[in-house]
Image (cartoon, rainbow, N blue to C red):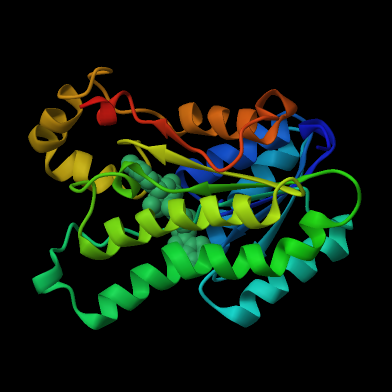
Amino acid sequence: MVSVADSIVVVTGGASGMGRSMTHEFADKGASVVVVDVDEDGLEEVTSEISDNGGEAIGVVGDVSDHDSVKNIVEQATDEYGTIDVLCNNAGILDDYTPAGETSEELWDRVIDINLKGVFLLTKAALPALTEGDEEGVVINTASVAGKVAGGGGAAYTSSKHGVIGFTKQLSHDYGPDIRANAICPGFIKTGMTEDMIEETPDEINDIVQSTPAERYADPEEVAQVVTFLASDDASFMHGTAVDVDGGWLVD
Ligand code: NAD
Protein backbone atom coordinates (compact mmCIF):
# COMPACT_ATOMS: atom_id res chain seq x y z
CA MET A 1 0.00 0.00 0.00
CA VAL A 2 0.91 3.66 -0.05
CA SER A 3 3.04 4.40 3.04
CA VAL A 4 1.08 5.87 5.95
CA ALA A 5 3.13 9.06 5.61
CA ASP A 6 1.96 9.54 2.02
CA SER A 7 -1.58 8.32 2.43
CA ILE A 8 -4.96 10.00 2.19
CA VAL A 9 -7.02 8.81 5.15
CA VAL A 10 -10.73 9.25 5.86
CA VAL A 11 -11.76 8.88 9.52
CA THR A 12 -15.44 8.98 10.48
CA GLY A 13 -16.47 10.02 13.95
CA GLY A 14 -13.21 11.94 13.93
CA ALA A 15 -14.34 14.79 16.17
CA SER A 16 -14.26 12.80 19.40
CA GLY A 17 -12.82 9.82 21.21
CA MET A 18 -11.03 7.15 19.24
CA GLY A 19 -11.69 8.82 15.89
CA ARG A 20 -10.10 12.01 17.13
CA SER A 21 -7.04 10.09 18.30
CA MET A 22 -6.86 8.27 14.97
CA THR A 23 -6.85 11.57 13.05
CA HIS A 24 -4.00 12.83 15.24
CA GLU A 25 -2.00 9.60 14.93
CA PHE A 26 -2.31 9.61 11.14
CA ALA A 27 -1.58 13.33 10.82
CA ASP A 28 1.43 13.05 13.15
CA LYS A 29 2.77 10.31 10.86
CA GLY A 30 2.45 12.61 7.82
CA ALA A 31 -0.85 11.43 6.32
CA SER A 32 -3.46 13.84 4.94
CA VAL A 33 -6.65 13.28 6.90
CA VAL A 34 -10.28 13.84 5.96
CA VAL A 35 -12.06 14.11 9.29
CA VAL A 36 -15.78 13.33 9.11
CA ASP A 37 -18.37 13.94 11.80
CA VAL A 38 -21.85 15.31 12.44
CA ASP A 39 -20.31 17.56 15.11
CA GLU A 40 -19.25 20.71 13.26
CA ASP A 41 -17.64 22.42 16.28
CA GLY A 42 -15.67 19.30 17.17
CA LEU A 43 -14.46 19.05 13.59
CA GLU A 44 -13.20 22.63 13.65
CA GLU A 45 -11.33 21.94 16.87
CA VAL A 46 -9.62 18.80 15.64
CA THR A 47 -8.63 20.22 12.24
CA SER A 48 -7.22 23.36 13.92
CA GLU A 49 -5.22 21.23 16.36
CA ILE A 50 -3.79 19.25 13.45
CA SER A 51 -2.83 22.31 11.45
CA ASP A 52 -1.34 23.95 14.58
CA ASN A 53 0.83 20.83 14.90
CA GLY A 54 1.95 21.23 11.27
CA GLY A 55 -0.30 18.45 9.96
CA GLU A 56 -2.70 18.28 7.02
CA ALA A 57 -6.43 17.76 7.45
CA ILE A 58 -9.82 18.92 6.26
CA GLY A 59 -13.11 18.54 8.11
CA VAL A 60 -16.25 17.35 6.36
CA VAL A 61 -19.57 17.60 8.13
CA GLY A 62 -21.33 14.38 7.25
CA ASP A 63 -23.76 11.76 8.50
CA VAL A 64 -22.56 8.26 7.62
CA SER A 65 -26.11 6.90 7.70
CA ASP A 66 -27.27 9.22 4.92
CA HIS A 67 -26.66 8.27 1.30
CA ASP A 68 -26.28 11.83 -0.06
CA SER A 69 -24.07 12.85 2.81
CA VAL A 70 -21.79 9.87 2.21
CA LYS A 71 -21.55 10.72 -1.49
CA ASN A 72 -20.51 14.23 -0.50
CA ILE A 73 -17.84 12.91 1.90
CA VAL A 74 -16.18 10.94 -0.91
CA GLU A 75 -16.47 13.86 -3.34
CA GLN A 76 -14.90 16.28 -0.88
CA ALA A 77 -12.05 13.87 -0.09
CA THR A 78 -11.25 13.15 -3.73
CA ASP A 79 -11.67 16.80 -4.82
CA GLU A 80 -9.21 17.88 -2.14
CA TYR A 81 -6.64 15.09 -2.26
CA GLY A 82 -7.32 13.12 -5.46
CA THR A 83 -8.02 9.71 -3.92
CA ILE A 84 -8.61 7.71 -0.74
CA ASP A 85 -5.98 5.21 0.44
CA VAL A 86 -7.31 4.37 3.90
CA LEU A 87 -10.88 4.40 5.16
CA CYS A 88 -11.53 4.20 8.90
CA ASN A 89 -15.23 3.55 9.46
CA ASN A 90 -15.32 4.50 13.12
CA ALA A 91 -18.45 6.59 13.79
CA GLY A 92 -20.88 4.88 16.10
CA ILE A 93 -23.42 5.30 18.85
CA LEU A 94 -24.47 3.22 21.87
CA ASP A 95 -27.94 1.89 22.63
CA ASP A 96 -27.74 2.36 26.40
CA TYR A 97 -27.48 -1.42 26.85
CA THR A 98 -31.19 -1.79 25.99
CA PRO A 99 -32.44 -5.41 25.85
CA ALA A 100 -34.51 -6.51 22.84
CA GLY A 101 -37.84 -6.33 24.65
CA GLU A 102 -37.31 -2.67 25.45
CA THR A 103 -35.70 -1.66 22.16
CA SER A 104 -38.03 0.52 20.11
CA GLU A 105 -37.99 0.12 16.35
CA GLU A 106 -36.71 3.69 16.19
CA LEU A 107 -33.73 2.93 18.46
CA TRP A 108 -32.97 -0.27 16.53
CA ASP A 109 -33.03 1.58 13.19
CA ARG A 110 -30.90 4.46 14.44
CA VAL A 111 -28.18 2.22 15.87
CA ILE A 112 -28.12 -0.14 12.89
CA ASP A 113 -28.21 2.79 10.42
CA ILE A 114 -25.20 4.54 11.93
CA ASN A 115 -23.12 1.60 13.19
CA LEU A 116 -23.69 -0.87 10.36
CA LYS A 117 -25.39 0.71 7.34
CA GLY A 118 -23.00 3.66 7.64
CA VAL A 119 -20.03 1.31 7.29
CA PHE A 120 -21.58 -0.24 4.19
CA LEU A 121 -22.60 3.08 2.59
CA LEU A 122 -19.25 4.81 2.95
CA THR A 123 -17.24 1.73 1.99
CA LYS A 124 -19.35 1.29 -1.14
CA ALA A 125 -19.03 4.95 -2.08
CA ALA A 126 -15.27 4.93 -1.47
CA LEU A 127 -14.54 1.64 -3.28
CA PRO A 128 -13.73 3.24 -6.67
CA ALA A 129 -11.14 5.52 -5.02
CA LEU A 130 -9.79 2.77 -2.75
CA THR A 131 -9.28 0.33 -5.63
CA GLU A 132 -7.93 2.67 -8.31
CA GLY A 133 -4.23 2.43 -9.13
CA ASP A 134 -1.81 -0.37 -8.28
CA GLU A 135 -1.68 0.00 -4.51
CA GLU A 136 -4.12 -1.84 -2.26
CA GLY A 137 -6.75 0.19 -0.46
CA VAL A 138 -7.10 -0.24 3.28
CA VAL A 139 -10.35 -0.35 5.26
CA ILE A 140 -10.38 -0.44 9.06
CA ASN A 141 -13.77 -0.79 10.72
CA THR A 142 -14.34 -0.08 14.40
CA ALA A 143 -16.34 -2.98 15.78
CA SER A 144 -16.17 -3.76 19.52
CA VAL A 145 -15.88 -6.63 21.96
CA ALA A 146 -19.66 -6.45 21.46
CA GLY A 147 -18.97 -7.72 17.94
CA LYS A 148 -17.86 -11.04 19.39
CA VAL A 149 -19.74 -11.57 22.66
CA ALA A 150 -22.88 -10.40 24.43
CA GLY A 151 -22.86 -7.89 27.26
CA GLY A 152 -20.86 -5.04 25.73
CA GLY A 153 -24.05 -3.29 24.64
CA GLY A 154 -27.75 -3.92 24.16
CA ALA A 155 -29.56 -5.84 21.40
CA ALA A 156 -29.12 -3.26 18.65
CA TYR A 157 -25.51 -2.35 19.48
CA THR A 158 -24.34 -5.96 19.79
CA SER A 159 -26.10 -6.89 16.56
CA SER A 160 -24.60 -3.90 14.75
CA LYS A 161 -21.06 -4.73 15.86
CA HIS A 162 -21.40 -8.44 14.99
CA GLY A 163 -22.54 -7.14 11.60
CA VAL A 164 -19.48 -4.92 11.25
CA ILE A 165 -17.19 -7.94 11.71
CA GLY A 166 -19.21 -9.96 9.19
CA PHE A 167 -19.12 -7.10 6.71
CA THR A 168 -15.35 -6.78 7.14
CA LYS A 169 -14.82 -10.48 6.40
CA GLN A 170 -17.08 -10.38 3.34
CA LEU A 171 -15.33 -7.26 2.07
CA SER A 172 -11.97 -9.04 2.33
CA HIS A 173 -13.38 -12.11 0.63
CA ASP A 174 -14.86 -10.12 -2.26
CA TYR A 175 -12.19 -7.43 -2.78
CA GLY A 176 -8.87 -8.88 -1.63
CA PRO A 177 -6.12 -8.30 -2.61
CA ASP A 178 -7.21 -4.91 -3.95
CA ILE A 179 -8.66 -4.05 -0.55
CA ARG A 180 -7.09 -5.10 2.75
CA ALA A 181 -9.93 -4.84 5.28
CA ASN A 182 -9.73 -5.48 9.01
CA ALA A 183 -11.80 -4.62 12.06
CA ILE A 184 -10.80 -3.63 15.56
CA CYS A 185 -12.61 -4.71 18.71
CA PRO A 186 -11.97 -2.21 21.47
CA GLY A 187 -12.84 -3.03 25.06
CA PHE A 188 -13.64 -0.23 27.50
CA ILE A 189 -12.06 3.01 26.27
CA LYS A 190 -12.39 6.44 27.85
CA THR A 191 -14.13 8.54 25.18
CA GLY A 192 -17.15 10.79 24.71
CA MET A 193 -19.24 7.63 24.54
CA THR A 194 -18.20 6.34 27.96
CA GLU A 195 -17.24 9.39 30.03
CA ASP A 196 -20.75 9.74 31.51
CA MET A 197 -20.71 6.08 32.55
CA ILE A 198 -17.33 6.53 34.21
CA GLU A 199 -18.64 9.56 36.07
CA GLU A 200 -22.11 8.29 36.97
CA THR A 201 -21.43 4.59 37.69
CA PRO A 202 -17.75 4.44 38.67
CA ASP A 203 -18.16 1.29 40.80
CA GLU A 204 -19.84 -0.63 38.00
CA ILE A 205 -17.19 0.43 35.50
CA ASN A 206 -14.47 -0.42 37.98
CA ASP A 207 -15.92 -3.92 38.39
CA ILE A 208 -15.97 -4.39 34.62
CA VAL A 209 -12.40 -3.29 34.04
CA GLN A 210 -11.04 -5.04 37.13
CA SER A 211 -12.32 -8.31 35.68
CA THR A 212 -10.05 -7.91 32.64
CA PRO A 213 -6.35 -8.88 32.67
CA ALA A 214 -5.32 -5.24 32.13
CA GLU A 215 -7.37 -4.18 35.20
CA ARG A 216 -8.02 -0.74 33.70
CA TYR A 217 -9.72 1.02 30.84
CA ALA A 218 -7.70 2.49 27.99
CA ASP A 219 -7.09 5.88 26.51
CA PRO A 220 -8.18 6.29 22.89
CA GLU A 221 -4.57 6.75 21.75
CA GLU A 222 -3.90 3.09 22.62
CA VAL A 223 -6.47 2.09 20.02
CA ALA A 224 -5.37 4.65 17.45
CA GLN A 225 -1.85 3.20 17.50
CA VAL A 226 -3.23 -0.20 16.53
CA VAL A 227 -5.19 1.42 13.72
CA THR A 228 -2.14 3.11 12.19
CA PHE A 229 -0.31 -0.23 12.46
CA LEU A 230 -3.17 -1.95 10.58
CA ALA A 231 -2.98 0.76 7.92
CA SER A 232 0.75 0.21 7.45
CA ASP A 233 2.78 -2.33 5.48
CA ASP A 234 3.73 -3.93 8.81
CA ALA A 235 0.22 -5.44 8.69
CA SER A 236 0.53 -6.46 5.01
CA PHE A 237 -0.61 -10.08 5.53
CA MET A 238 -3.61 -9.22 7.70
CA HIS A 239 -6.89 -9.57 5.82
CA GLY A 240 -10.38 -9.87 7.29
CA THR A 241 -9.35 -10.11 10.94
CA ALA A 242 -11.08 -8.57 13.94
CA VAL A 243 -8.25 -7.48 16.23
CA ASP A 244 -9.02 -7.29 19.95
CA VAL A 245 -7.78 -4.11 21.64
CA ASP A 246 -9.54 -4.87 24.85
CA GLY A 247 -7.12 -5.27 27.77
CA GLY A 248 -7.94 -8.98 27.60
CA TRP A 249 -11.74 -8.61 27.98
CA LEU A 250 -12.27 -11.57 25.62
CA VAL A 251 -9.78 -14.03 27.14
CA ASP A 252 -12.50 -16.05 28.84
P1 NAD B 1 -17.38 9.10 20.78
O1 NAD B 1 -18.80 9.34 21.11
O2 NAD B 1 -16.32 9.78 21.56
O3 NAD B 1 -17.12 9.38 19.23
C1 NAD B 1 -18.04 9.00 18.24
C2 NAD B 1 -18.11 10.10 17.19
O4 NAD B 1 -18.98 9.65 16.15
C3 NAD B 1 -18.68 11.43 17.72
O5 NAD B 1 -17.82 12.49 17.39
C4 NAD B 1 -20.01 11.54 17.02
O6 NAD B 1 -20.40 12.89 16.77
C5 NAD B 1 -19.73 10.78 15.73
N1 NAD B 1 -20.96 10.33 15.07
C6 NAD B 1 -22.07 9.82 15.65
N2 NAD B 1 -22.99 9.56 14.73
C7 NAD B 1 -22.46 9.91 13.53
C8 NAD B 1 -22.94 9.88 12.19
N3 NAD B 1 -24.18 9.45 11.90
N4 NAD B 1 -22.12 10.29 11.19
C9 NAD B 1 -20.87 10.76 11.49
N5 NAD B 1 -20.39 10.84 12.73
C10 NAD B 1 -21.17 10.41 13.74
O7 NAD B 1 -17.23 7.52 20.89
P2 NAD B 1 -16.00 6.50 20.73
O8 NAD B 1 -16.00 5.66 21.92
O9 NAD B 1 -14.76 7.18 20.27
O10 NAD B 1 -16.60 5.61 19.55
C11 NAD B 1 -15.92 5.35 18.33
C12 NAD B 1 -16.29 3.96 17.87
O11 NAD B 1 -15.76 3.01 18.82
C13 NAD B 1 -17.78 3.67 17.82
O12 NAD B 1 -18.06 2.91 16.63
C14 NAD B 1 -18.04 2.83 19.06
O13 NAD B 1 -19.16 1.99 18.89
C15 NAD B 1 -16.75 2.06 19.15
N6 NAD B 1 -16.42 1.49 20.46
C16 NAD B 1 -16.29 2.28 21.57
C17 NAD B 1 -15.88 1.70 22.77
C18 NAD B 1 -15.64 2.52 24.01
O14 NAD B 1 -15.44 1.94 25.09
N7 NAD B 1 -15.61 3.82 23.94
C19 NAD B 1 -15.65 0.32 22.84
C20 NAD B 1 -15.82 -0.44 21.69
C21 NAD B 1 -16.19 0.15 20.49
Residue shown at 10%/72% (left/top)? 102
Residue shown at 91%/52% (left/top)? 133
Task: Identify which residue, 158 or 56, lies in the foreground.
Answer: 158
> Does any portion of residue 167 appear in the rendered image?
yes
How many dots with numbers?
A: 0
- Residue 197 placement (x, y as % from top left): 20, 45
Res. 114 image quadrant: bottom left
Quadrant where the C terminus sits is: top left
Quadrant where the N terminus sits is: top right
Is 146 situated above or below 252? below
- Residue 95 placement (x, y as % from top left): 25, 62
- Residue 16 placement (x, y as % from top left): 48, 48
| Left or right, residue 176 beside residue 199 | right
Which residue appears farthest toward the front when viewing the image?
173
Res. 94 image quadrant: bottom left
> Does any portion of residue 13 appear in the rendered image?
no
Res. 216 image quadrant: top left
| Left or right, residue 154 beside residue 63 | left
Residue shown at 80%/64% (left/top)? 128
| Left or right, residue 108 beside residue 134 | left
Residue shown at 48%/70% (left/top)? 117
Is 180 situated above or below 221? below
- Residue 59 placement (x, y as % from top left): 68, 58
Is 128 situated above or below 193? below
